[in-house]
Image: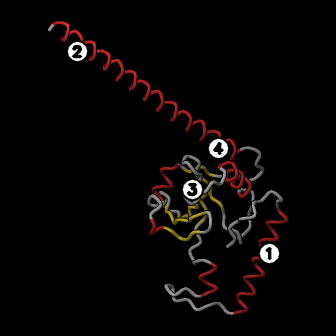
Amino acid sequence: MLSTITTLIHYVAVISVLIMLLGGFLVHIRYLVKRTIRLLVKEREEILSANTSGKSAKVFSGKEIKKSANNFAKENLLGSGGFDEVFKGTLDDGTIVAVKRAKPGNAKSTLQVLNEVRILCQVNHRGLVRLLGCCVELELPLLIYEYVPNGTLFEHLHGFCLREWAPLSWLRRLIIAQQTDDRLAYLHSSAADLPSRCQVK
């Protein structure tokens, strides 16, 4: 009987030690993950601020952007393309923004996005959608643009039934084509490093 109690005490002691070791291991892993995230955010911010002669991008917090876009709810979805989705958001100061994020599973490089942000901060043209900043805290970086409230070019060209717009006249379409050409020429001539996919108003 005494040996059974002694054996039971040994089992309880061994299990207690194992539980304490597992708990310590989990706490250590959590610390390493938080430290890695902090270092990654710092590295991303350094990339954004390095080697820019123009304005630097504002770095938004992940919490702020998730809140502004209502955690990327479908009712805030403005549109989507092959690789990205754009959501409408309202910042704490009341500024309405367009938040662009990669579609889940898009393997676009974080470094590529950060370089795009660094370059686009140097572009200033009234016909280009202005990049306000980005968010580098989340798994995939987010781009935050000014919000253009008058609908998409597609909606204007084809008439959009929900907005009850008539399609644009051919003269207006020609003017839009000429202005688009001017904006693309500006992008082409102002910086050879600019990404080919820039948002044009």
Can you give x and y, in whole percent of width and height, for residue 11 in the image? 28, 16
Q: Residues within 10 Å of mark 1 (few under 14, many from 20)?
A: few
Q: Which mark is residue 171?
A: none
Whichever of labels 1 and 3 marks the residue nearer the N terminus, that label is 3
Mark-to-mark CA distance, 2 and 4:
54 Å
Going by the numbered disc 4, the residue's amino acid type is Arg
The secondary structure type at the circle numbered 4 is helix
In this picture, is 59 found above or below 39? below
Q: Is residue 145 left or right of residue 67?
A: right
Q: Which mark is residue 182?
A: 1
Which residue, given by chain and number where applicable, does mark 3 sit on? 105
Image quarter in which the C terminus is found = bottom right
Give the foreground label among 1 and 4: 4
Which residue, given by chain and number where applicable, does mark 2 sit on? 8
Whichever of labels 2 and 3 marks the residue nearer the N terminus, that label is 2
Going by the numbered disc 2, the residue's amino acid type is Leu
Mark-to-mark CA distance, 1 and 3:
35 Å
Image quarter in which the N terminus is found = top left
Can you give x and y, in whole percent of width and height, for residue 113 in the image? 67, 53
Q: Are marks 2 and 3 in contact (CB under 8 Å)?
A: no
Q: Looking at the rendering, which quadrant does residue 105 occupy?
A: bottom right
Q: Nearer the viewer, residue 23 or 126?
A: 23
Q: Nearer the viewer, residue 126 or 150?
A: 150
What's the residue at 60%, 77% (across, down)?
A: 152
Give the foreground label among 2 and 4: 2
Which residue, given by chain and number where applicable, does mark 4 sit on? 44
Mark-to-mark CA distance, 4 and 3:
21 Å
Q: Residues within 10 Å of mark 3 (few under 14, many from 20)?
A: few
In this picture, is 112 found above or below 151? above
The secondary structure type at the circle numbered 2 is helix
